[in-house]
Amino acid sequence: MLGLVILFLLLSIIAGILGFTVLMATAAEIAIILFVIFLIFFVVSLILQILRSMELTIAGNLQGRHDMLRWILVFLIIAIIAGIFSFTGLMVAAAGIAKILFFIFLILFVVSLILHLMKR
């Protein structure tokens, strides 16, 4: 899909150089549409990959592994990168997810600490 975007972008540049403005505009619009479709597919696959990783992490946490702090840092980094690029909506969402995960992690830590101290 990205190859088609680049192909139509190159076609619009060549058409612009040769003076074919109608062909240039059409090819540029097709490139934009294909890029948006590519971007949507990329974001959906990224979300599915994150959800799959979260599922494995949650399953691991139920079996005794603790990777939740890593997820907090991942969403914090996403929030910082989104803030740098001025994607304020994404920044607020990622920071909110990091905050929620932090409090869940903190609660689970306190509960496991109390249970550990009660076993002794």
Image (tube, rainbow, N blue to C red):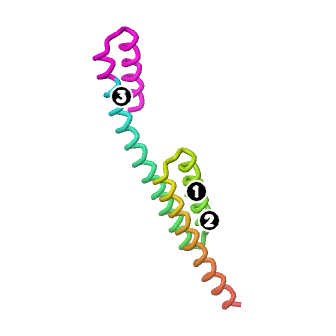
Give the residue at the far right of this rendering.
120
Q: Residue at x 33, y 18 (%)?
A: 24
Residue beneath disc 2: 69
Q: Secondary structure at mark 3?
A: helix
Q: How far, Cα to Cα, is label 2 from label 3?
A: 40 Å
Residue beneath disc 1: 74
Q: Position of residue 75 (x, y in %)?
A: 55, 58
Give the residue at the far top of this rendering.
18
Amino acid bearing label 2: Leu
Question: Alpha-carbon neighbours of circle 3 within 10 Å: few (<14), some, or many (≥20)?
Answer: many
**In the image, which disc is placed on residue 31?**
3
Vertical side of 26 occupied by 40: above or below: below
Q: Residue at x 37, y 14 (%)?
A: 16
Question: Alpha-carbon neighbours of circle 1 within 10 Å: few (<14), some, or many (≥20)?
Answer: some
Question: Alpha-carbon neighbours of circle 2 within 10 Å: few (<14), some, or many (≥20)?
Answer: few
**Secondary structure mostly seen in the magenta stretch:** helix
Vertical side of 100 occupied by 84: above or below: above
Quarter-of-image position of residue 65 = bottom right
